Amino acid sequence: MPATVPVWDPRQYLRHSGHRARAFVDLLARVPELPEPAPSRAGRPRIADLGCGPGNVTRLLADRWPTAHITGLDTSPEMLAEAAPLAGPTPGGGHLDFAPADVTTWAPPEPYDLIVSNATLQWVPGHVTRFPAWVEGLAPGGVLAFQVPGNFDSPSHRLMRELARSARWKDRLGATLRHDDAVLAPAAYLHRLAGLGCEVDAWETTYAHLLEGEDPVLDWVKGTGLRPVLTDLGEDAEPFVAEYRALLREAYPATEHGTVFPFRRVFVVARKPGRGEAEGR
């Protein structure tokens, strides 16, 4: 795992928000109908967004479930500060709020109808060990849905790791970047969650993002995967970035149409049995 907790830059992250949000929209499209909320909640589904970041996709949950009480959770003060203006009543009669929470230890304090996470669990070592607590915290018929990047073998990440472990940088960055245990294959996630009694839909998609501008792949990873390096190096980051930029230009050449950035993602939607369903299986 990273030697230090990455410092996040919401504005940098949001520079490619349209491309990043596409995977979340595709994930939500496969989420089934949520269970009927308990009478005590007046018909308002309870939803948690783990690793909500700046809240730009969290608010999309209110489009699908307009009456829901939605809480975005994140450890980054910078991201939560960016998200704060979005909090409050939603147009459909629901409510959106944000709170600090560590996904590595968070457990549902009340029954949730949906626990969702967008490109966060790759930052959580051993995140599959949290599945039992999250599934336990779902209401009967509730859903756990998440997507994670599956591109750790792509040039953007492989070149970053190789450079970090090179002679010039290994003393400062040799242990900064995770890879082997960051995410699992779709079938492995299916196995884990089916073992908890869930009905599981797991798949992967590779997007071919067409990026514009100068060094757009570098600009993309500055908002995400490069954050641990930038955090560890601080003011000394520019020489590393310059070397990395040259490698990316060769790996992702610009064309007359823009720069193509293939990006594999892994998706999982797991539904907990509803009342009476478990016995009927």
Image (cartoon, helix red, strand yellow):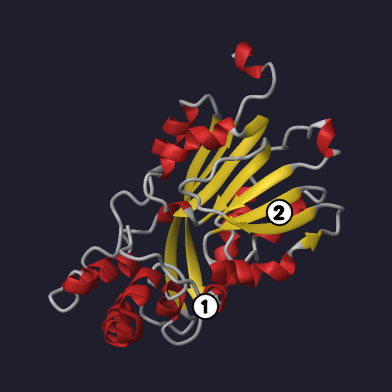
| Three-letter code for the amino acid on which mark 1 is drawn | Gln
Looking at marks 2 and 1 on the same chain, the residue that comes earlier in the sequence is marked by 1
Residue drawn 67% across the image and 38% down it: 112
- Tell me residue 41's x, y (percent): 81, 38
Please give the residue where the numbered disc 1 appears in the rendered image: 12
| Three-letter code for the amino acid on which mark 2 is drawn | Leu
Q: Are marks 2 and 1 in contact (CB under 8 Å)?
A: no
One can see residue 31 in this view: no
Q: Is residue 35 left or right of residue 134?
A: right
Quadrant assignment for the N terminus: bottom left
- Tell me residue 3's x, y (percent): 30, 64
One can see residue 195 in this view: yes
State whether residue 220 is above or below residue 187: below
Q: Around disc 1, counting alpha carbons within 10 Å, would you say few (fewer than 14), some (14 to 19), or many (20 or more)?
A: some
Q: Residue furthest top?
A: 279
Separation of marks 2 and 1 at Cα, in angstroms: 23 Å
The residue tagged with tag 1: helix, strand or loop? helix
| Quarter of image, res 250 | bottom left
Q: Around disc 2, counting alpha carbons within 10 Å, would you say few (fewer than 14), some (14 to 19), or many (20 or more)?
A: many
Residue drawn 36% across the image and 52% down it: 182
Quadrant assignment for the C terminus: top right
Name the residue nearer the viewer: 17 or 169.
169
Q: Is residue 102 left or right of residue 262?
A: right
Residue drawn 45% across the image and 48% down it: 104
The residue tagged with tag 2: helix, strand or loop? helix
Please give the residue where the numbered disc 2 appears in the rendered image: 61
| Quarter of image, res 168 | bottom left
Residue drawn 46% across the image and 34% down it: 190
Q: Residue furthest left?
A: 167
